[in-house]
Amino acid sequence: MHKPGKAGPLDPAAICRSSDPMAVRELLTKIGDKWTIFVVLSLDLLGGRARFSELERAVPGISQRLLSSTLKNLERDGMVVREVFPEVPPRVEYELTDLGRSLLLPTQGLVDWAKTNWEQVREAQSRYDAR
């Protein structure tokens, strides 16, 4: 139930009636994938700019292939810029753009929610699984 003073309820039907509902759905799917949030948050924790190897260490469990793919998608979507330095061996750094940084606040809200509610979710899962 909607509480006064809070943000209004999300209306999936309104999203579908928006100018480009498929784009909204696609972007929400990309942002909500398994690794995007962790890569964006890790870039922020590393000062907003990092080398591939730094990100690989900062995101436990991600493979090189998945990190590379996630960074390419973030670059394509304008959330990350990739800079190659003409050195031997070449040095490559990734940096959050203003658009990428704008994702931090809503992402932090989701992370805070998960931290606050994970025990309740786990308890609900246990009750469900016990049935």
Image: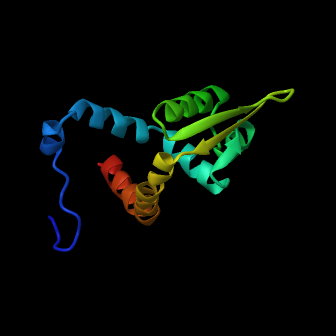
> Which residue occupies the extreme bottom position in the image?
5
> Which residue occupies the extreme front position in the image?
86
Residue 76 falls left or right of residue 20: right
- Residue placed at 48% from the left, 37% from the top? 78
At which x and y percent is residue 97? 53, 46
Residue 26 versus residue 123 in the image, above or below: above
At which x and y percent is residue 92? 72, 34
Quadrant, the N terminus: bottom left
Residue 3 versus residue 59 in the image, above or below: below
Residue 61 versus residue 72 in the image, above or below: below
User: In which quadrant of the rendered view does residue 66 lie?
Assistant: top right
- Residue placed at 38% from the left, 62% from the top? 120
User: In which quadrant of the rendered view does residue 89 lie?
Assistant: top right
> Which residue occupies the extreme right position in the image?
88
At which x and y percent is residue 11? 16, 49
- Residue placed at 56% from the left, 27% from the top? 69
Residue 67 falls left or right of residue 110: right
At which x and y percent is residue 18? 17, 39
